[in-house]
Each structure stands twice: as structure tokens, then as C-alpha cells.
């Protein structure tokens, strides 16, 4: 039966953004550490507040598991002579392993019998190992930024003030610089700062709560929602929040309490997004809305202490939000005095990137590309698409967006509606930024979708064109996200667009800004898209070999590639699939490096190759027709009809005949058949049992 391990790292306030990842990393690190040291354990819990990181491991084994180590020595015939006497090789090997030669064992392998040394390593007691384990664990927790303090060398997110380390009710002693572990934790910094002794996780949680600390972030999250909603109901409303806001507030507090404040109804004339951004992003307040989702002139603030007088707390926060909203109202009114067209002209003075020109130049490029895309999809949209492209970035020069950068696109939409632009244009101005994250909301309008694709293609081509491409995890211009955005917009709208054509058009528009050969840029970008598309498809559950097989034939047509993958997944269950895939792996190996040649039926000298050629002619036209209609499942079923002819051909026909003309003719036949299959997928990529 194991014992419980409790570790608490008490610190100065750690930034809220650091803590969710720290909780996950702590779990991962300790699991790997115990696994590597052969120490069994039960459930692991990791928790955090701004001032403490907590780890609890249940049923931690009292000692390491014993280990049997095997070491191979010389072959039997080298280790012993014909009379069974040990050679110098055997005695030397035994001595090197700390064994007597009589303790050596024999092991039979594929190469014969070998001498083997087996040693049992007795596991050490966990209590003895824990000091080193915990010191290493604490030092291994990664943070976006870490710091040193005083004259110490140790680095952590924030200075460590105390460490609790308890195993089976006993303190595990160790030092990290000038901090010695013990059994004393501390309560809330302001409401109960005195230390208290703990001996178990259960006691720790109870005493923390008694001292105004809720250690479990899930419990704090629930408390925040319940308290905030209760306060909002007092003004006949309900809270409006984002997941990011809730997570941030959860990790800003140890003992959350809610207080309601209010602001002047006059500010409700400002667009909702302006008010919610000001409250959520800048102040971490919960806006209050009615049943219809309309903003009410109230907000909820979450405190980290029990307020002696909630009214005083409310007034202090009201003073802060009043100043914020007054600024927003001023910006909103001032911005309307200047048209979006004038703001658009101001972009001539704004540098998009030193190697790619101004934002105005970028928009002019996007306009041309958007017109090209509209021509492919629906030429009747060209006027609204062009107007959307012109105004898409105009709000970047407004005072509101300069103050609240999160409102780009949103303010463009609002100012466009106020100015009397067509509603579809106003909506598309906002939508062209979508999606703003992987898996995020996609544009609804065609105008928004087209300008979004054009803008993102222009950005990707531009940065690849000046050799500023993503490397490793570094992607400062979010090109991976933008590539995924293009892929998902095209799939969502089922647009008949060719990525290769879009890239070519963008390269032509960009002209002399490019610092690399256009062909090289095009190839790199297509490979870049292939990687993003492949990762997405596999993460969605599509078999990796099917994805690889289809994308190996090209990734330019996103929509058709996905349809081919879906058809291949269904076809995989067909009885002829695996034998056919196996046969065409063989085809691929035989014709590797062979260029297309013409088939001369007169040179066929066996019934099997004649039959294969006839079967190919019988299905090829129908297969091409099915592919033209994007009916890939039917095309694959037609291809399956070749199985018997292919099997017979390989069984009876020698492809690499001595006669050059015969060999060339047979290779040409296989190449034609392979090309037909490659219209859907490269079957050599399919994983088979054979």
C-alpha cells in the first residue's frame, strides 16, 4: 500500500496566463519522473492559485520496483572451450559485470547461443529518493518567462516564499537555495496570512479554505459563475462572459467574491462590442445583459477579498469604467466625422512590412486578387467584393481601433453601416478577418469569404516571397493559421478554387516585390498548405495513409482532395482494395523512373497482357467520366475491376523482358494504368499487410 505525497510551492503572485499550462505541465513532468524511476502511484491532482502551485499524488509506492538488467556477452563458443572451461573472454566479461563466471547464463538468439549476465537491481525507498525528485520537479516546471531574485541563481515564475512537502504524513526535507521545505502553508495574503501546519491533502484543502484560499481552480470557477450570476439577477440580468475571461479571473483570485457596479445608460448608444471589450479585455469585468442579450448598464467585478463595504468597491470600479467608456464614446463620435474612404487613403502612410510596402499597397493587391476569385465563383459579386476590399482595413486608422485593437473589423462594420454602405459590405468587412483562431467561426457571406481568402493568400505569398517563412514553432506572422483559414473557408463554401492558380495570380500581382524565383515560392507554398491540410485531416480522424496517398497526387484542389479521401475511406472496406493496393505498390516499384511511352498492342505476346490492356480500355473512359463528376467512389469501384487482370498479369508475365521493345511496351502499359489510378491517389502510400 502506497502513501500520499503533497507538495505546495508558495510564491508571490504568478500571472494568471501562466497557470493553466503550469497545471498541465506539472502533471506531465511528475508522471514521467515516477515512470522513469519505476515508482508506482495512483491518481495525480495538480492545482494552482496566484500564490501557490499544488501537487498531490495518491498511493505513491514506498519503494522502487526491482529491476532485472540483462547484458549480452560473447558467443558461447568464444566464452567456453569444447570441454566447457571458461575462456579469458568469459572471465573478463563476468568480472566487468561484477559476477563470478559461474553466475553467467546462456541466452539463445537468432544468431546462436550467447553468454548473458543477469543482475537484479533492488529498488530504493521512495522517501530517500523524493528530495532529489522534488527539487528536479520544481526546477523543471516551464514558464513563458522566469526570474531570479535576491542574489540567488534559481529561476522560477515568481520568487518562492515557502514549500510544503509531505509524504505519508512526514515532512520530506530539502532545500532550494535559501528555502527549506516543511509542513507549514499560508492562508490568504490579506485576510489570513499566518502559517498553519498540514499533514495530508484533505487537511490541507480544509485549512486553506478556513484561511480564505480555494485551491481547486474548478471550484473557484464554479464559485465565480454562481456568485456573479446571483449578483446579476439582483439587477434583473445575467452575466455575459467569454471562456478567456472566466479562466483569467479564476487564476487572478484565491477567494473570489462578486460586486455589482453600474454606468450611465447614455453609454449604451456605443456599439455593444466596444463596451464589452472595454469591460472584459481592459478591466476583467463581467458585462450584464438581459434575456435578449442586450447590454444593461451594469457590470460585475470579481474581488480577491471579502469586501467590508461592497458599495465602496463598486464606486471605485465605476470611476474606472466611467473614464474608459467616456474615452470610447469620444473616439466613437470623433471617428464618424471622417469617412472610411478618407481613412483608407491614410493607409498610404502606414507600413505593412518594410519589405512588402504599405497597407494601402497591400489592399490594392487584395482588390485585384479578390476580383479574380469573384470571377471564378460568381462574377455578379465583383462590385460588392471590391467595395469590401477597399474598406476592409480602413478602420485601422480610426481612433477606436488604435485604442482597442481587438475591435478591428468590428468598428469597420459599424462605421460602414452608419455611413450607409450596403449591409452585406459592412458584414463582409468584419468577416474578412475570420477565422481568428483554429476552428474559429468562418465568414457567412461570399463577399467576406472571398476577401478573406484574397487577404490571406496575399499575406502568405508576400512573406514567402521575401523568405520570411515559419520555422519550427516560430510563426511571427501567423501564416499557419491563415493557411488553415483559407482551407476551411474553401471547404465550408465548397469553392471550385485551385490553390496553385491563386498563388500564381498573387505572384503576378506582387511583381518585383518578390526576392525569390516565383516557381520556387509556388512550390514552397503548396507544400506548406499540404502540411496544414494533412495535419487537419489526420486530427479529424481520417486514416493517415489515405490522406498521404491522396495528397501525394496534388493539394491544389482542396474540395476535391477531401472528397477523394472520403471515397477512399469507404473503398478501403472493399474486398479488392488491399490486393489492388499491394499490386500497385509493385507497379510503382517496377515503373519507377520510367517516363510515359506509347503502347503498341501488336507487341503483346501473352494472353494476360492482352487481357490487362483490354480491361484497361474497357474501364478507363468510365473512370475518367466518374472523376469528372467528382464521383470518386464509383471511379474506385471501376478501378477494382482490374484486380483479376492485374493479378494474372503479374503471375504469368515477366515485365522486364530481355527484348527492349517488349519490355518498353509492358512498362508503357503499367505506366498508363498507374496514371489512371493517380488521378485519385498514389496507392503506393497505402499501408497493407503484404
Image (cartoon, rainbow, N blue to C red):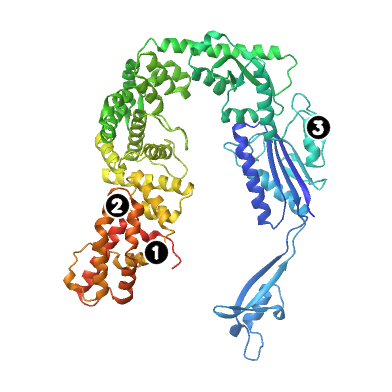
Disc 3 marks which residue? 195
**Residue at 29% across, 39% down:** 502
Q: Earlier in the sequence, mark 3 or mark 1?
A: 3
Callout 3 touching callout 1 (CB < 8 Å) = no
Few, some or many C-alpha atoms within 10 Å of disc 2 (few <14, some 14-19, many ≥20)? some
Q: Secondary structure at mark 1?
A: loop
Q: Quick check: 172 left or right of 604?
A: right
Q: Disc 3 versus disc 1: distance between alpha carbons?
A: 73 Å
Q: Quick check: 348 left or right of 471?
A: left
Whole-percent x and y of residue 110?
55, 78
Could you say which quadrant of the image residue 496 lies in? top left
Q: Which circle marks residue 239 in the picture?
A: none
Q: Earlier in the sequence, mark 2 or mark 3?
A: 3
Few, some or many C-alpha atoms within 10 Å of disc 1 (few <14, some 14-19, many ≥20)? some
**Residue at 18% across, 69% down:** 601
Q: Nearer the viewer, residue 142 or 533?
A: 533
Disc 2 marks which residue? 626
Disc 1 marks which residue? 576
Few, some or many C-alpha atoms within 10 Å of disc 3 (few <14, some 14-19, many ≥20)? few
Q: Disc 2 versus disc 3: distance between alpha carbons?
A: 77 Å
Q: Secondary structure at mark 2?
A: helix
Amino acid at each position: 500500500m502506497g502513501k500520499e505525497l503533497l507538495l505546495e510551492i508558495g510564491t508571490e503572485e504568478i500571472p494568471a496566463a501562466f497557470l493553466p499550462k503550469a497545471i498541465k505541465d506539472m502533471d506531465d513532468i511528475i508522471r514521467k519522473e515516477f515512470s522513469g524511476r519505476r515508482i508506482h502511484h495512483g491518481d495525480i491532482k495538480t492545482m494552482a492559485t496566484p500564490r501557490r502551485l499544488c501537487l498531490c499524488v495518491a498511493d505513491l509506492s514506498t519503494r522502487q520496483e526491482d529491476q532485472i538488467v540483462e547484458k549480452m556477452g560473447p558467443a558461447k563458443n568464444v566464452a567456453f572451450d569444447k570441454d566447457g572451461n571458461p575462456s579469458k573472454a568469459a572471465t573478463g566479461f563476468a568480472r566487468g559485470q561484477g559476477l563470478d563466471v559461474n553466475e553467467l547464463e546462456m541466452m539463445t538468439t537468432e544468431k546462436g547461443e550467447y553468454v548473458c549476465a543477469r543482475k537484479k537491481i533492488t529498488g530504493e525507498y521512495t522517501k530517500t529518493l523524493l528530495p532529489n525528485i522534488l527539487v528536479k520537479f520544481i526546477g523543471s516546471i516551464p514558464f513563458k518567462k522566469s526570474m531570479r531574485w535576491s542574489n540567488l541563481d534559481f529561476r522560477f515564475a515568481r520568487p518562492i516564499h515557502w514549500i510544503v512537502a509531505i509524504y505519508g504524513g512526514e515532512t520530506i526535507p530539502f532545500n532550494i537555495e535559501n528555502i527549506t521545505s516543511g509542513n507549514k502553508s499560508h492562508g490568504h495574503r490579506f485576510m489570513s496570512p499566518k502559517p498553519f501546519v498540514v499533514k495530508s491533502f484533505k487537511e490541507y484543502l480544509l485549512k486553506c479554505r478556513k484561511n480564505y484560499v480555494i485551491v481547486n481552480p474548478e471550484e473557484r470557477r464554479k464559485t465565480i459563475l454562481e456568485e456573479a450570476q446571483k449578483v446579476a439577477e439582483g439587477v434583473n440580468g445575467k452575466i455575459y462572459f467569454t471562456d478567456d475571461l472566466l479562466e483569467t479571473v479564476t487564476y487572478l483570485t484565491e477567494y473570489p467574491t462578486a460586486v455589482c457596479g453600474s454606468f450611465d445608460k447614455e453609454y449604451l448608444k456605443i456599439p455593444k462590442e466596444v463596451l464589452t471589450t472595454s469591460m472584459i479585455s481592459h478591466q476583467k469585468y463581467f458585462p450584464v445583459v438581459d434575456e435578449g442579450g442586450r447590454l444593461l448598464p451594469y457590470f460585475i467585478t470579481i474581488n480577491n477579498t471579502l469586501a467590508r463595504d461592497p458599495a465602496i468597491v463598486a464606486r471605485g470600479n465605476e470611476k474606472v469604467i466611467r473614464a474608459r467608456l467616456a474615452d470610447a464614446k469620444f473616439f466613437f463620435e470623433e471617428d464618424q466625422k471622417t469617412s472610411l474612404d478618407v481613412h483608407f487613403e491614410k493607409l498610404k502612410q502606414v507600413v505593412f512590412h518594410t519589405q512588402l510596402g504599405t497597407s494601402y499597397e497591400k489592399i490594392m493587391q487584395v482588390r485585384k486578387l479578390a476580383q479574380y476569385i469573384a470571377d471564378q465563383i460568381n462574377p455578379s459579386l465583383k462590385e460588392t467584393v471590391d467595395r469590401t476590399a477597399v474598406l476592409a482595413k480602413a478602420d485601422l486608422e480610426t481612433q477606436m481601433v488604435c485604442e482597442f485593437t481587438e475591435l478591428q473589423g468590428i468598428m469597420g462594420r459599424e462605421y460602414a453601416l452608419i455611413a450607409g454602405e450596403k449591409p452585406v459590405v459592412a458584414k463582409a468587412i468584419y468577416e474578412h478577418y475570420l477565422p481568428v483562431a483554429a476552428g474559429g467561426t468562418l465568414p457567412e457571406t461570399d463577399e467576406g469569404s472571398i476577401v478573406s481568402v484574397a487577404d490571406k493568400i496575399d499575406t502568405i505569398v508576400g512573406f514567402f516571397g521575401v523568405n520570411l517563412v515559419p520555422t519550427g514553432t516560430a510563426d511571427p506572422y501567423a501564416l499557419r493559421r491563415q493557411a488553415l483559414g483559407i482551407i476551411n473557408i474553401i471547404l465550408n463554401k465548397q469553392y471550385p478554387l485551385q490553390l496553385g492558380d491563386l498563388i500564381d495570380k498573387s505572384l503576378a500581382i506582387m511583381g518585383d516585390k518578390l526576392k525569390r524565383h516565383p516557381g520556387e515560392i509556388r512550390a514552397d507554398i503548396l507544400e506548406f498548405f499540404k502540411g496544414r491540410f494533412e495535419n487537419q485531416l489526420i486530427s479529424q480522424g481520417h486514416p493517415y495513409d489515405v490522406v498521404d496517398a491522396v495528397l501525394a497526387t496534388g493539394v491544389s484542389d482542396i474540395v476535391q482532395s477531401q472528397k477523394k479521401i472520403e471515397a477512399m475511406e469507404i473503398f478501403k472496406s472493399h474486398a479488392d482494395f488491399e490486393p489492388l493496393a499491394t499490386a500497385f505498390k509493385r507497379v510503382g516499384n517496377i515503373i519507377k523512373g520510367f517516363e510515359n511511352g506509347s503502347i503498341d498492342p501488336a507487341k503483346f505476346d501473352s494472353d494476360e497482357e492482352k487481357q490487362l490492356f483490354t480491361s484497361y480500355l474497357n474501364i478507363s473512359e468510365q473512370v475518367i467520366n466518374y472523376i469528372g463528376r467528382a464521383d470518386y467512389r464509383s471511379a474506385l469501384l471501376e478501378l477494382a475491376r482490374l484486380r483479376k487482370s492485374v493479378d494474372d498479369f503479374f503471375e504469368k508475365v515477366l515485365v522486364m523482358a530481355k527484348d527492349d521493345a517488349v519490355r518498353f511496351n509492358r512498362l508503357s502499359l503499367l505506366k498508363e494504368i498507374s496514371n489512371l489510378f493517380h488521378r485519385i491517389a498514389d496507392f503506393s502510400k497505402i499501408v497493407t499487410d503484404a
